[in-house]
Amino acid sequence: MSLEEKINESETKIYKAVFPNTTNHYDTLFGGKAMQLMDEVAFITATRFSRQRMVTISSDKIDFTKPIPAGTIIELCGRVIHVGNTSLKVSVEIFIEQMYEKGREKAISGTFTFVAIDNDKNPVKITV
């Protein structure tokens, strides 16, 4: 299987409803909750790509371009964008969908870096 096929096969999409218990005092998705969900999708994507133990080592700039109101549906999309020797990068985007209208718009994007580790938590080569 080619690298591109492996990247396509590991692309991960998760949908969530934005309920009031995940929002801030402005009635929009709490930024920390968005980051948690993004890291989770990035972890799943990295693991599906490598089928190895992966740990988050950094998150790059996360851009919050649109507030995500309560009562909407969000789609989180994770995709591997770079593969190194022991690490890889995953791009995650969050899109907003209104519950009762068509269409979607990008609200948040960011990049997460993971390292493959062995049973002793030492970095190991990513097998492609």
Image (cartoon, rainbow, N blue to C red):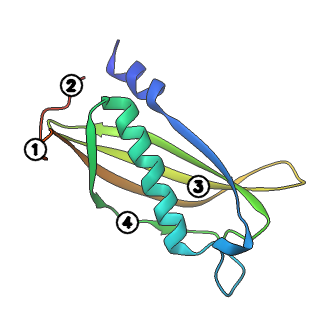
Q: Residues within 10 Å of mark 2 (few under 14, many from 20)?
A: few
Secondary structure of the residue carrying tag 3 is strand
Q: Nearer the viewer, mark 1 or mark 3?
A: 1
Mark 2 highlights which residue? 127
Label of residue 61 in the image? 4
Label 3 is placed on what type of residue?
Ile
What residue type is disc 1 on?
A: Asp
Which residue does the image show at 36% across and 36% down from the upper left?
A: 47
Q: Secondary structure at mark 1?
A: loop
Single out the residue that lies furthest toward the right.
Answer: 100
Q: Which residue is mark 1?
A: 120
Disc 2/disc 3 C-alpha distance (Å)? 28 Å
| Closer-to-camera residue (126/3) | 126
Q: Say whether disc 4 or disc 2 marks the residue closer to the N-terminus.
A: 4
Residue 105 location, x and y as percent? 69, 55
Give the Cα separation between the discs numbered 4 and 1.
30 Å
Question: What's the CA distance linking mark 4 and mark 2?
Answer: 27 Å
Residue position marked by numbered label 3 in the rendering? 94
Q: Nearer the viewer, mark 2 or mark 3?
A: 2
Observer-nearest of 54 and 13: 54
What amino acid does circle 4 point to? Answer: Lys
Q: Is residue 16 above or below residue 33?
A: above
Residue 128 x %, y %: 25, 23
Q: Quick one: SS at disc 4?
A: loop
* CB within 8 Å, label 2 to label 3: no
Q: Are marks 4 and 2 in contact (CB under 8 Å)?
A: no
Whichever of callouts 2 and 3 sits on the residue coming sooner in the sequence is 3
**Which of marks 4 and 3 precedes in the sequence?**
4
